[in-house]
Amino acid sequence: MEKVGIVGYNQVKLYSDANYGRYEMIFEAVRGALDSAGLKKKDITTVVSATNDYYDGRTISNALTVEPGGGYLADESKVEMDGAHAVLYGLMRILSGNHKLAVVWGGSMASSFPYHTARLYETDPIWERPLAYVNDITSAGFQMRAYMEKFGVSAEDIAKIAVKNRKNAAKNQLALVEAQNPNLTVKDVLESEIYADPVTELMVAQPCDGVAALLLAPEKQALKITDNPVWVIGVGYNQETYYLGERDLSSSKSMELASKMAFNAAGVKNPLSEIDVAELFEAYAHEELILSEAIGFTEKGKGASLSSEIGGDMPINPSGGALGGNPPCATGLIRIIEAVKQLRGEANGYQVKGAEKAIASGQIGLCAQNNILYVLEGGN
Amino acid sequence: MNEKVIVANKGLIRADFNFWVGRYLDKFYDNLENKKIVGNTCPKCGDVFVPPRKICGKCNEVIPLEENWVDLPETGILINYTITPYKVNDRAFRKVKKPQTIGMIQIDGSNTALIYRLLNLEPDNIKLGMKLKVEWEENTKGDPSDIRGFMKI
Amino acid sequence: MGRQVCVASAGFSEHASKRSDVNMPELVNEAIVDCLKRVPSLDIKDIDAFVNGNMPAFEGSNIPELWMTDWMGARNKPLMRVTTGGTTGGSVAIAGYYSVAAGLPGVDNVLAIAFEQQSQGDTSVGLASVAYGEISVMNSLGIPYDQLTLLLSGGAAIGIASYQATNYMRKSKITEEDLARVVVQNRHNAAKTWWAHLKMPDLTIEEVLDTPYISYPLRYGMVCPASDGACAMLFTTEEKAKDICDIPVFVNGVGSIANETALIGYGGSGSGQLDLSEQLGAQKTSEIAFNQAGIHFPRKEIDYAEVYSPFPNQELMWVEKLGLFEENTATKMYETGVTALNGELPINCSGGVNSTNAIGASALERPAVAALQIMGKASNQVPKTVHTSLGHGWGGYVNLVTMMVMADEPVRKY
């Protein structure tokens, strides 16, 4: 796969209830990304957005975001998945040779809609939905129990991940204030309110308001735009089957296959030794372990033994991850941006020293049914 | 064409949606109304699906509508569960009076799992792998709510 | 960089106002089976990646492809969901094209799928929510009620289309009879298309003009139906296409240019400063797509066109704005039979969206039919040989446009 350059990025500060409009937020993110690369609206040839009609509360959510997203008279489309999937479509458009600068943005305002109810609308309407037992929260309960039972992992091990990510988030200026807690303990996490046993409140990535934007350009253009580009050298995406009862929830088949595809493209043989930092979209604390195992950092069930703090063997989510704030349709895109920051040495306060190769992931669906993984490489 | 309809819950969009269930599920719901559980089998891998379906996703095989039906018992084992104090389909995500225990139950002789409430079971008494039995609603309507939940045998 | 992309096949489910014999995944499966029937050497397991889309609010399901994974054969396969409202199908087709063109390792055969089972929901409510969203959500967003009333008067797609129709009629000085003529041609064509919805082989202009107005100048007999249906299209590389089908169809140009929404009216009601029959987005889209495809005189070089026109005035407008005919001459072309099945430049021989409208699928059915016409495998095949064709779509607040230009010969870019 040919290299594609990431030449600019921007993310707005995450708020649990941002006191400003959705379109201002989109404009701020996209304009900020263009400014970061010294580019103008006229340089944009294509725009790919990630929004969701249900999350935005209107049909054709992208019809009204054309102008703030920089899409006026540009080749525009929308991916109704995670922002990380929109980056994939932007990448395809660049790789095809048809486009020279792609703006990819994603986001929503979770404060304006009942997020967990909206997730219920993802379920099978002719069997599971009328009963209303399955949504994101209860399925996470199933997932965490399956993982603990299969491998004998304790709730403490999983709470430790929540502690690590929320402590990391405290160093990240853009993270959600409510998620930042430098003094959090494992006991606090385990004793927080039960959402769906064994999942507790502090293990859940809190939906919030936020938009992020990223600029992609072909190799030649990227080198003209910036002397500090980050290269996308591999991508993999995959979707597993839907019904929870037919899936092995203790592991992630889709991430296994997605990472295989991405690592093949990037020529990565041993992820643990070749990758310097990982930003994974963990909607729940236990998903970070399941995803990192599927990627191949450790054997299945051994994820908790990996030292994943900043300065550890494999720093995972130094930015705080999704637990540091989860704006639907932007979270995966923010993971990519955070990985880019690490590779450019711009992660103030949570920089992993000497990071040269990073991975970033995005997901959608109950229990991360569809996963996408990027392999990124620093320009220097 | 048969016109079997399930009205899904109202919620985010204030319009009623009447979902066609298709012929496979139609047969399933007819049986459910008579307090019977049926499934169908993939002719290739032999997996048994409850509820029945047209395609086996593993083999990409069409399961003919007229064949491969299996009568199943109303017993099964618990393969996973969670306990939540929340009302799952509530707009405001409000709590219910008593936390509900939601289990994943594999009906004996099938390869899939049903997700239903576990009735009259205290959290301390729940064990994965325990035997459970269907608790039927008194007046069945031929829709998913005909099964009220599962009880310990 | 990039690579040549071909269409190897396309397929449809049967369309009707109520496909109550199937559920959504089964409906989608029908289209996939029909699509793969034309490429017997290919199995569903040979599909490397999927692109999928519909209009989720009409269906009452968010991201339904999660649930229908197994019915599409997409288990453990890469899948991307693209939705852009009315243009969803066109956007899905273009995403299918880009999935192949990008040359990601291991992604060669890409199945693009779009569907809608409109009988399940109240589509006019869904369509109206194009304009006003859900009321309670609007409240929580703090959208004022005055905007709401304005939008209600806009009245969903037909509201916008009426404004557009009156604008167009004033400029090009056409009559209601001219609109009815377009409808009659479409419904006659639909009668010869196996999967079409409104098949009316004996419809006359008088009969159309006899039906009551829904919203002036559009009468009941002129507007599209709401259909249940699905469509699938197979994109692949040049090498593989030559192996699996007789006449590979090359995708030579794609475009989807967005016009502004702000001037279309307060909140997109269609009552704003911008003349909805201007269509700057469509003009730019066709300019880009034709340019990529090396087409300089569309009127001469395009042999067949499928344009997205739920309402007859739009068909007249699009064929002009896309550059197929001169401004204000389209109605003459319909009168003189240029656009008929055996005409010089046949338009919408499938019956078009005017006869079959499963919204999410509609804009995918346009390039699908256009490709099949080149292969000579369309249901209502034109008698002349088709070398180049185009499929078009519109959506959003009439501000989103998609277009795909195809031919039996490639334009070598790579």
Image (tube, helix red, strand yellow):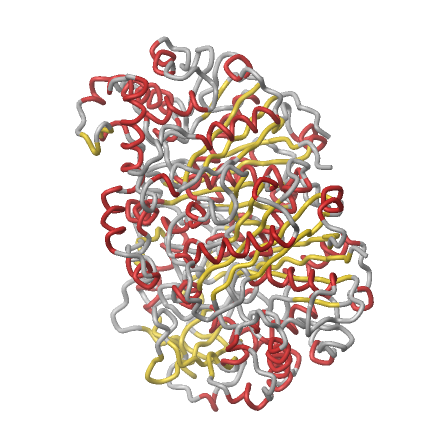
Q: Is residue C113 left or right of residue C207?
A: right
Furthest residue to the top? C336
Q: Nearer the viewer, residue C213 or A343?
A: A343
Q: Is residue A115 left or right of residue C293?
A: left
Q: Residue at x 32, y 61 (%)?
A: C142
Check the image and report above or below for A345 versus C272. Answer: below
Q: Is residue A260 left or right of residue C311?
A: right
The quadrant of the image that shows the C terminus of chain C is: top right
Q: Where's residue B137, x and y in %?
A: 30, 73
Q: Where's residue A379, x and y in %?
A: 78, 55
Q: Where's residue A292, x and y in %?
A: 69, 69
The quadrant of the image that shows the N terminus of chain C is: top right
Q: Is residue C254 left or right of residue B152?
A: right
Q: Residue at x 21, y 30 (%)?
A: C216
Q: Is residue A245 visible?
A: no
Q: Where's residue A245, x and y in %?
A: 52, 67
Quadrant of the image occupied by residue B139: bottom left
Task: Please tell me how many numbered marks the rendered image carries.
Answer: 0
Q: Nearer the viewer, residue B153 or A171?
A: A171
Check the image and report above or below for A203 versus A112. Answer: below
Check the image and report above or below for C170 versus A41. Answer: above
Q: Residue at x 32, y 41 (%)?
A: C265
Q: Nearer the viewer, residue B11 or A315?
A: A315
Q: Is residue B85 visible?
A: yes
Q: Residue at x 46, y 63 (%)?
A: B50
Check the image and report above or below for C241 versus C341. Answer: below
Quadrant of the image occupied by residue A279: bottom right
Q: Nearer the viewer, residue C298 or C114?
A: C298
